[in-house]
Image: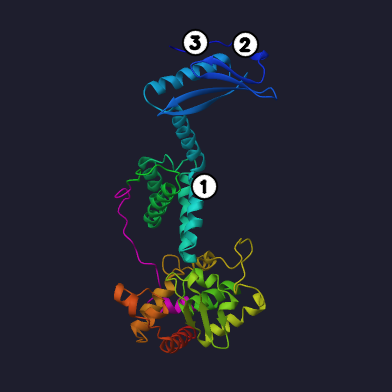
Amino acid sequence: MATATNKLTIPAIKAARPGKHADGLGLYLEVTASGGRYWRMKYRIGGKEKRLAFGVFPDVTLAEARDRRDQARRLLRDGRDPGAIRAEVKAAARRVELAGFPLVANQWLKHKQVGWALETHRKAKYVVETYLAPKLRKASVASLSTKDAAAALAEVAKVAPALAAKARQYLQGIVQFAEQQGLREDGRPLSLRGILPAHEKGHIPAATSLKSVTALVQAIEGYPTPVTRAALKLAMLTAMRPGVVASARWEEIDLDAAEWHVPGRRMKTRHDHIVPLPTQAVETLQSMRAYTEGREFVFPPLARQTTPHLHRDAMSAALRRMGFQGQHATHGFRGMLRTVARERLAIDADVLESQLAHAKRGDVQKAYDRTTFNAARRDAMQHWANYLDELKNG
């Protein structure tokens, strides 16, 4: 027999004493000792008794409570659990709230930072914050579609074609991270293969001819800002990556032994690297003592820079001011060493590769080849520095 319904009235609700007061078909009003009036519904599904909360009277009226009960009963009639459905809706709303693209992207960067080299993390952070986040700042990773992701990447390709492929890689990683964190449903990958226009990768510009290398060495020697000049000279004399040079720490450098010990966490290969310092590099570093001796970083930040050390872009800006835009980049010192030292000074290619700290190629080399050529590199880099001095002096 069907349970009688609509037993309650507004006056009865207002006068109700603490306890449970049935309205019918599972709906009841629960009155607390403090006078609170809460709408509840009791139901059974799969042999289990469950309850739903419909809100507080009078915010939820008697008519609204009955309407919610009827909606729940329609779901039960179809074999669906209204409580489970409500939990799914809440979870989906919560995912959307927590899955804003900038928020998830920042969490992904922090997650990856543990296993990445500093330079790898810096590049990813730059691409995400400069190109992806502004384009997707209002998007939720929970519901991000391939169409919206493709549109954002197309904009990146217009303004920074060389970084578009990296942006796509990072975006895929962020979405995968969101799935692993329960912020996006499983099995909803983005289909981004082939969406970027073909981009011909160019080599990093580097001075390699006798004339261009001479002009570069002489221009750096005459650059007026001493901190930037010293950083450029160290990059030129050691061929270390610009980010590693700009963030060099005094604790890594042994001027007496003429060595720079870069820890693996700051290297792209994740391996510790010993950099031999020719006498010219030692003199350059000694010139920085007047600026930062006793501090952590060798090269102090310039005015209006927010980093605790010289920003790597300061070196790039200096090269542009000297007229080398498109001809030589800060990273180009590595290509300059590899080309000029091999062609003009006949330095062994393996020694140069070791100086550049390039990863070993192939599984066998990675597993068994532990050569570092420390003694040979010390001689080679002094030879290189002397050669640059000859060009500087004409």
Would you call the spot at circle 2 few (<14 residues within 10 Å), some (14-19), or many (20 or more)? Answer: few
Q: CA distance from mark 2 to mark 1?
A: 47 Å
Q: CA distance from mark 3 to mark 1?
A: 51 Å
Residue 213 colored magenta?
A: yes
Q: Position of residue 57 (x, y in %)?
A: 62, 19
Q: Amino acid at mark 1?
A: Leu
Depth order, front residue of 22/274: 22
The answer to whether residue 210 is visible is no
- Label 2 or label 3, whichever lies nearer to me, is 3
- Residue 368 position, x and y percent, is 33, 79
Q: Nearer the viewer, residue 376 or 235?
A: 376
Residue 334: name its quadrant: bottom left
Highlighted magenta segment, given as a residue range: 192-217
Residue under circle 2?
A: 10
Q: Which residue is mark 3?
A: 4
Closer to us: mark 3 or mark 1?
Answer: 3
Q: Residue at x 53, y 86 (%)?
A: 258
Q: Indicate the secondary structure of the residue bearing disc 2.
A: helix
**Residue 199's spot in the image, x, y percent?**
32, 56
